[in-house]
Amino acid sequence: MKPTVRRSSVIVGLVALLCGGSAAGTFTYAQEKHSDSASDTPHTAPGEDKESKQKSFTNAEAGQCLDWKTSSDGTVSDFQTVDCAKSHRFEVSHRENLAAYPASEFGSNAGMLSRKRQAELTDELCKQPTLSYLGGKFDPTGRFTIAPILPPQKSWADGDRTLLCGLQVTGNNGHASALTGKAADQDQSPVFKPGECVAITEKKDVNQNKQTEGDTSVDATAQVVDCNADHQYEVTDIIDLGEKFKEYPSIEDQNEYLNKRCTDSVTAFIGGDDKLYNSTLEPFWTTLTEDSWKGGSRNVNCSLIKTGDNNSLSTLKGSAKGEFTINGNPPPPQPSRAPKRGN
């Protein structure tokens, strides 16, 4: 096995960037997909909008949660307000009546807003109220995205200009995932569960992607896949940095702490030091930027990875707990080594 603190921290930089890029990159898509789906489907019984006397497609107000069903083709049905303690897909943070704005694009004869315009309105009308709703605690690269819901096409044509702003977690398919509890009460870290395998779309030279604090600019996606499918890493643990650090720890301090924690984690996960050595896999971990820490995130992942000769991420297939391949081949036999002290 060859990872060192220095090499591991470089790997961490790449993966943290990829994960951060994934969260940031899905922001617009999550809005667009969700808004588009909601626009074409049945919603709750209408209620009267306070501003315009026009019947609104929903009575939902800030602090309430919404749920619906989504078919395989993206069609939404059974749109309803539910208890936030129960399974839901959207938490309302703010309600706007676009008819109160003089712009002709919201007029009685205006057509449905484009996806691009919906994304712009999210920044203009949803972002700040949602941050206030959360008490300023929002991780910009975390689990939650700020998203809008507009009326379905028929309600829009009838003059309903209700805009709901809120929070959702976007799944692999681009749809809002089910969750329970309010966002303000949850850790916002975009972590995966132990035993999950994750595929990423961007595999760049590790040495060209050293992380700097606050840098989450890499455009990539990370999603859970079956471990028998191609993937880049397998998650072994979730570590709560808040248990160790009371104030934000620098990337260097995180690396120093996680080097041992994650090495111990992957060793136990795979079944011992000998198995880890013979697997040729390497421990790595994600880290938190200061913005994420300020947003309330504390959790990071420990995982198993394999870097190639060109410092790119290798493609794994199969769980590290059993038989697996690295770029299509089983791990190469390793030379014998002296037993570790204490064995």
Image: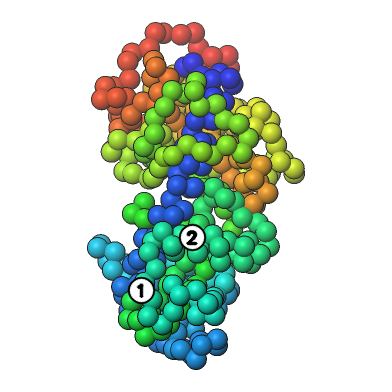
Among all residues in the image, which is located at the extreme right? 246
Given residues 193 and 136, the one toward you in this image is: 136
Pinpoint residue 98: horizontal percent, then vertical percent: 50, 76
SS at badge 2: helix
In the rendered image, the vertical position of residue 207 relative to residue 63, given as above or below: above
Residue 120 image label: 2
Q: Residue at x 54, y 47 (%)?
A: 141
Is residue 175 found left or right of 242 in the rendered image?
Answer: left
Q: Earlier in the sequence, mark 2 or mark 1?
A: 1
Residue type for callout 1: Gly
Given residues 16 and 51, the one toward you in this image is: 51
Task: Please report contact status of discs 2 and 1: CB closer than 8 Å, yes or no.
Answer: no
Q: Residue at x 45, y 84 (%)?
A: 56
Given residues 129 and 12, the one toward you in this image is: 129
Distance between the alpha carbons at the discs numbered 2 and 1: 16 Å
SS at badge 1: loop
Is residue 1 found left or right of 152 in the rendered image?
Answer: right
In the rendered image, the vertical position of residue 292 relative to residue 183, given as above or below: above
In the rendered image, the vertical position of residue 201 relative to residue 263, given as above or below: below
Q: In the figure, residue 221 lies in which quadrant?
A: top left
Q: Residue at x 40, y 55 (%)?
A: 29
Residue where numbered disc 1 is placed: 111
User: Is residue 275 visible to the viewer in this orientation of the structure?
Assistant: no
Pinpoint residue 134: horizontal percent, then vertical percent: 64, 63
Residue type for callout 2: Glu
Q: In the figure, residue 244 lies in which quadrant?
A: top right
Q: Residue at x 44, y 55 (%)?
A: 28
